[in-house]
Structure formats: C-alpha cells, structure tokens
Image (cartoon, rainbow, N blue to C red):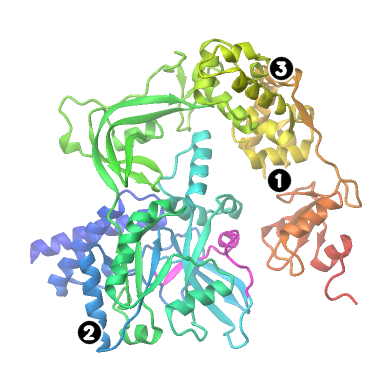
Amino acid sequence: MEAAEARILELRTKIDRANRQYYVLDHPEITDAEYDALFRELVELETQYPELVTPDSPTQRVGGPPSDAFAKVTHRTPMLSLANAFEREDVREFDKRVHRGLGDVKVEYVTELKIDGLAMSLLYEDGRYKIGATRGDGYVGEDVTPNVKTIPSVPLSVTIPSEFPRAFEVRGEVYMPKRSFQRLNAELAAEGKPLFANPRNAAAGAVRQLDPRITARRRLDTFMYALDPAGGARSQEQILGRLAEMGFHVNENRRKHDDIEGVIAFLDEWQEKRHGLDYEIDGIVIKVNDLGQQAELGFVSRSPRWALAFKFPPEQAETVVEEIKVYVGRTGTITPVAWLTPVQIGGVTISRATLHNEDEVARKDVRPRDHVIIQRAGDVIPEVVRVLTEKRATTSRPWRMPKKCPECGTDLVREPGESATRCINPICPAQVLEHLRHFVAALDIEGFGYATLQQLIDRTLVKDPADLYHLVKEQFLSLDGFADKSAQNLLDRIEASKPTTLVRFLVALGINHVGWTMAGLLADHFGTIERLQAATVDDLRVIGGVGPTVAEEVSEYVQRPESRTLIQRLLAAGITIKPPERVEGPLSGKTFVLTGTLSSLTRGAAEERIKALGGVIGSGVSKKTDYLVVGADPGSKLEKAHRLKVPVLDEAAFLELIGRPSDNAR
C-alpha cells in the first residue's frame, strides 16, 4: 500500500506538471503517448486502491488551470473530457457497457474525427456571438472572445428559429490547418524565431495571444460538434446537421453505425486515410447517437458514459543520428539538421529531421551516433522527440555549432537575445542560391529549378538576381538538360517577368519580415520604390500593421549600398514597376479602417466600395486614418480612434458617404 501511495503521488505530480506545460504554457515537455501512459497507470492504481482517490487527483479533473493573463469564464455546464481507448477491444468493451446501461434496446453510434486542436466554447445571445472561452480546467476557462472573433469560420451572427432559446452554446475545436502551420513555421524560421512543434501547439498559442491581430494572421479554423440546448434535435446526427445549417463549420467526415463493428471499420479506415487531410487528427470520437439514451447513461466524474475517444497509436520510430549537418538559408540563418538512418513513419521514409537552432540541440542534447525517437510533427515535419541516453556511447561528446560558415568560411555571428546563428557574408554561395530561388518564385519565373540555378552559380554566370536578365541562349545551351526550345522558353519567361508590381518586386527582394501582406502595406503607402528608399524608420512606423522590428529591417535594407545597387541594376536590366492603379473619386486620398460587423453588407463588399470610390483601406488606426467605420461589436480600434480624435462613422453615415442608403432610410 505504501509503495502504491508513493507511486500515485509521483504520477499526480508528473501529470499536473504536464497539464500546466500543455494547457497553460503551450509548451509540452512530454509527448502525448508518454502522458497517456502516465495517466493510464494512475487510473489503474486508483482503481486498485479506491481509498487513495482524492478530489484533486488528475483523474478527477478535466484539463489544466486557466492562465492568469485572461479573464475567467465559468462554463454553463462543465466541459468534460472523454475516456480514452487505445485498442479495438477497448471499443468493444465500451459497447458492452453501453448495452448493460441501456438494456435490450437498439443502439446507434456516430463517429467523428478527433481533431487535434484546442477545445472551445462559443456563447451566443439573440443570435450574436458573445463570448469565446477555452476549456481551462473544465469548469472555468479563459475569455478569448476577441481572438476567436478573428477566426473566419466562427459566425458573428446566426439565424435561429423563433422557438430557439435566447442564449445557447456551441462547442468544438479550434485548429490550425497544415498549410497554415507550414507557412507560419516558414515565417518564424526566416525571422530566426523558435518554431512550433505541431499545429496543435501553434493553434493554442494563436488563440491565447494578447493581441488579436496576431491571432488573425495565424489563419485558424474550427470544427464544431456540440449544441446546448439541442434546440429540438433528438440525436447527435441531428445536432451536427443543425450546426451546419446555422453556418458553423462541421466536419463532413462522420458516419452513423448500427453496430460496433461498423465503428471499428471506421477507425481502421481513418487510421490509414488521415495523412491525406489538411488538418491533424489523433483519433476518432465515438458517441451514442440518441440524446435520450445519452441522458440515460449519464456521466462519471470526468467524462460521459455515452462517448469514447479512440486514440491512434503515436507515429514514432527509433533510429540513429548518423551526423548533424548545418545548412545556410536565404537570410544567412544556420539550421542544424540531423541526418538519420532511414526509417518508415506513417508510410513515409524519414532520413532527416530539423533541429531548428543551437539552443534546441543543446536543450535536447542531440549528438552524432545517438539513438533517438523521432516523429512526424504535425504529420509534416520530422522532429527528434527525445534521445535514448541509455544507448549512448561513453565516448559521446556534445555537438557544437561550427564557428565558420560551411559554404564560404565566414565567421558565424549570433546576436545577443537571438536564437539564430547567421552567416553575414552577402555573397555566400548558399545564400545566393536561396536568394535566387526566392526571387524567381516571387516573380513567377517558371523553369528555374535547383539544378539550373546551381549550375549558373557554379559557372559564375549569375551572382545575384540582376544577372538573370543578362543571360543569353548560348549560356543556357551550355548547361546540362537544355536544348534550343527549353532555353528559348526560359528566356521568354524571364522577359515576361520584367513588367511587375511593387508588391511582387518587394517580396522578390527578400527583405527580412517582408512577405506578401507586409509588401502590400508598403506598396499601398509609398506607391513607388523611390519613395520607399527615401523613407526613414519613423516614416515606416506610422503605417498601420508595421511594427518597430519590420520598420528597422526595411529601413536598414533600403539604405544598404549593396541593396541600392541591386535595385538599380534590376531596373536598368529592364524591370518596370507598374504604378498602382489609382482610382479617382470622391474618396481619393482618404484612408478608411473598418471595425465590427456591418449589417447591410459584408466587410469585403464595404472595402471594395471604398476602393472603387478612390479610398484606401488601412489595417490599423493611426493619426493618418481619415475615418473609422464602426459596425456592431467594435474592437479596440474604436477606443484608439477616440484617443487620436479620428472621425468615426456609424453604419448609416458610412452608407450615406458611399452613396448607398441605409435600410432605415425613407
């Protein structure tokens, strides 16, 4: 008994720590599989010794405590988690328990994909979105209303039947699509910032941002699955249908089953098919379909008796780190990569895994010849989960970041406070190659593959993007893989890229932190490359959406002599930047910012109308904003507009300004 009690206390401590890391800090230190193993062991011990169960045991709780950074929201009904199953036989046992609880009646099940995201509660009053809250500890969550409001698939207002209650709640998962996850990590890598390990962590971090604008840029999505009260629905199947009719995003990959073997077939099917989805799933949720039967079965302390979460086994594998190599990116960032003994995970052969940066290698203490456990983080990026130190050779030594660039031999630099180590040689061959690849992609010049660009660099035919515009057919014909027609086609594509827009040109230059969105803000504000080159840091910082870091980076780039030379050479080579299309109209020269929801037209339609009349759309309120257009449920922009004395237009005044009468006009 004493040994069991000591182990139970140890398990509770570990699980409580893991819960805090997962739910509050969004930085888990152990894998889901390790957490599940700890939790199962605790459940088994507490089942064996029920007298040792205490109210504060993790088995009696639902999640982690809410963060102090957000206001608290008490849930109308507890947001319970589901009991887990890991084997098919566990699912059959669940079916037996359901039938024992209901007696000799027909039972249907509904299966839904278990989205690996962040559980969310949405409260609506009179059909309008009112509160968004995280699960928290299941009873009290975090108020993330402004952040959830930025998610496009969350309706801000819904049409409800007259018999529907004034207040109702919708529950589901907020998740980050794989494509958004890849884009986000690419942006973080370019900025030398730590990467997210998987889409779930990225979604949680996005929802819990203190600045909703950051949440909006993370491109989140939702799948909703619960409605309270059910509004006349008699089954889970009907609830999902009603949610879809109301405009909520509901996962279509669901199925109704007459028996448990159909459920198991669904599990088998999606364990194989899940990699084809653009979002992460970590299992299947099984629910008794009939709501009356659900009520009859009821709940245990932390989960309903009528539902079960079947969790797929973790897709991990053991392999060996053959060596750690470093690679030089477009901006000079040095990335260590583990070269692995090839191993299969989820039908994909994995032979490399990113180690992100020097700090990450040190934190995990990854060394050459180590035995490691790897997994496909987010089913996309292979990562080293942990090192099997018990298999490490006694002669092993910690890995050290090289002192010099592996490509050009320049001394590497790491600035204080940054995680990135960089090569600062602007003519480093690796940086030149990556810069060229970025340039041709941004200007949409098809046909420049890796091998072609590498040959051009190796033969000293190209050292920067401007050289591409001086190539002739004979030079292409001297390269491997080119004939007369393919050489001419590529020359034609180079020529076709010369007329371009300022947005595309700025992206192609490869300025740190300047992607398509930021380039659009700069182009809208300055209009020409010459005006941008003359801009100071202060000029840049007044632009809504341009922060101090971006302002410093852009200013430094355009003032750098080699950057000015490159821009001049590109223009001299024939690149012409088409002037932005200026629409003359009654709103010419006026900058508008919109906040809240307009009842008579969509945000997109309002912006298009402003542009059609010559106005400009701003992303944030500043002293240079001419008007703030305010709809229902405005955000913090309204307060800032009042502070800066920016004129505010309500919907009726805005409609009058753009020449469209409001619905109340007679």
Mark 2, secondary structure of its residue: helix
List the residue tagged with mark 1. Answer: 544
Q: Main secondary structure of the magenta part?
A: loop
Tell me the SS state at disc 1.
loop
Is 144 magenta? The answer is: yes
Q: Residue at x 30, y 78 (%)?
A: 305
Mark closer to the chain start, 1 or 2? 2
Three-letter amino acid code at the position of disc 3: Arg
**662 lies above or below 354:** below
Q: CA distance from mark 1 to mark 2?
A: 62 Å
First-in-chain label (2 vs 3): 2
Report the mark closest to the observer, 1 or 2. Answer: 2
From the image, state whether disc 1 or disc 3 is nearer to you: 3
Residue 627 vertical placement versus 520 (above, below): below
Label 2 crowd (10 A; few <14 / some 14-19 / many >=20) = few
User: Residue 440 occupies which quadrant of the picture?
Assistant: top right
Give residue 515's position: percent from left, percent from top.
62, 38
Q: Label 1 amino acid?
A: Gly
Tell which of 273 and 157 is nearer to you: 273
Q: Residue at x 50, y 38 (%)?
A: 186
The residue singled out by tag 2 in the image is 100
Which secondary structure, mark 3? helix
In this rendering, the answer to whether 101 lies above or below 204 is: below
- Magenta-drawn segment: 137-158
The residue beneath circle 3 is: 569
The percent position of residue 193, horizontal first and vertical second, equals 48, 37
**Drawn side of residue 373 relative to residue 429, left or right:** left
Residue 596 included in the magenta stretch of the image: no
